[in-house]
Image: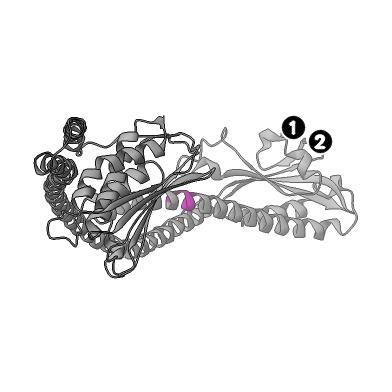
Amino acid sequence: MKRPFNLVLTFSIASLISIVILMIGLSWLLGKQLESRLLARDQLLIGTVIQEEVNEHLARNLPFETVYKDPEFLDDMLEATMEIPGTRGLEILDTSGKVLWSTDPERLGTERKTDLLSQVLEGKSVIEFRDDDHSEASSVDWKFDTGLYVPIVQNQQVIGVFEIHRNNARLKQQVESLKSEVRFYCAIFGLGLYFVLMAIIVPASRILQSQYKQLSSTAKTLKDVNEELKLTQRELLQKERLSAIGEVCGAVAHGLKNPVSSVRSAVQLLGAISLSAGEREEITQEILQEVDRLTKRLNDLLNFIRPFELNLQYAQLTDILKNAVRDLKWKAREEQITLSTEFPDGVESIQIDASLITEAILIVLSNAMDASSNGQTVTCRLVSDEDCQLVLITDQGKGISEEVLPHVFDCFFTTRSQGVGLGLALCKKIIELHRGRVSIESGENKGTTVRLEIPVVREIAESPAL
């Protein structure tokens, strides 16, 4: 059984890498959000302060051209803006972007070309990050070298723009400090998440390891049981082979008994009574026929270990029954038993294996004679209809008890001291091979009737093995 992978080690490495990547991404995203929020707040505060200062001077309803040239206005604006940390300069622009006033005299009269000016003219404060004018900002990240554009509004109209140049190292420090805090808390959160996951995975891994050990033990047990089953199977096969050998021996003995008995009876008749030449010839022919049948039966019975295969040919049951009765007539004469037959006329031929059916009928007839006493009669009848042909063999013997009747078709079951218990079992197999049915009606001191039902119309696709 394949050993499972190390869940704790695999998960600890995979989760650690995943959490580190997640926390780095989260801290970067939160840092960007904090930076954006701080810049927006700074922009709003400065814009509000500047606008308040401007509104005080514009309240006199003087033209803007007059206001921005007023020294008092300029002093107030310089004082208000220069107090803001990081402020480097101040410029006043008209709505076209022309510099009207500047803390840097060299910028007077120049025009500010920026796409942000249109947003400022709509009344919005806009911040611009500059990357081309930071020669004095070597100690400060250029990203915080900004230009803040604050609209000058009078009567709900933008009449000018303040541009405040800033290099806000303090704001940078605030942003970096907050980013460090975000990274710290993200690291703490990630570490906590890692330990929580490990607290779940470690017990789960122990459970899996325990289940693996149990499965391994079960697999080993099943393997041992499988080996024992294989050994038992081999032993059973050996016993079956021995049983088959015994069955074959019994079947051979049973199959030889009837022909040998017939030959013995015929030989005794030859020597016991005075016979005419014709009668001797007839008995001699009967003996030869029995010997031939004995030879054939030997061959059939010796092949018993192989499955029987039907050799279907059209035949008449009346002919088979007559031949069977004829084969047993010397035995019947010796035992003073009358063999009576009742066959209807015009019985149609059916597809059967004549040899096997003859064997089955001889078994039943022989059993009926063995169960009969001197002077009794064994009757063999044939009843035919469209669906089946029924052979009825009846004796006047002692019958079969209710306790014995269910076992009469079992192999090696017999109530006779010299029997082997294979006759009716073989008969049943032969009839069932023809898709027929065998049944027995009997009662103590009431005689026995054996019914052999053979279907007339059927399709036998394959010959089942006996």
User: From which residue to which does the magenta span run?
Assistant: 24-28
Q: Which residue is mark 2?
A: 96
Q: Amino acid at mark 2?
A: Ser
Q: Do the CB atoms of the residues marked 2 and 1 lie less than 8 Å apart?
A: yes
Judging depth in this view, the residue of 210 and 72 nearest the camera is: 210
Q: Is residue 11 left or right of residue 243?
A: right
Question: In the rendered image of this protein, does residue 442 appear above or below residue 292?
Answer: below
- The residue lying at 77 percent from left, 48 percent from top is 151
Q: Is residue 331 left or right of residue 50?
A: left
Viewer can see residue 464 = no
Viewer can see residue 205 = yes
CA separation in Å, label 2 and label 1: 8 Å
Q: Amino acid at mark 1?
A: Glu
- Residue 111, labelled with which disc? 1
- Given the current orientation, which residue lies at the most extreme left position? 271
Residue 265 percent location from the top left of the image:
15, 44
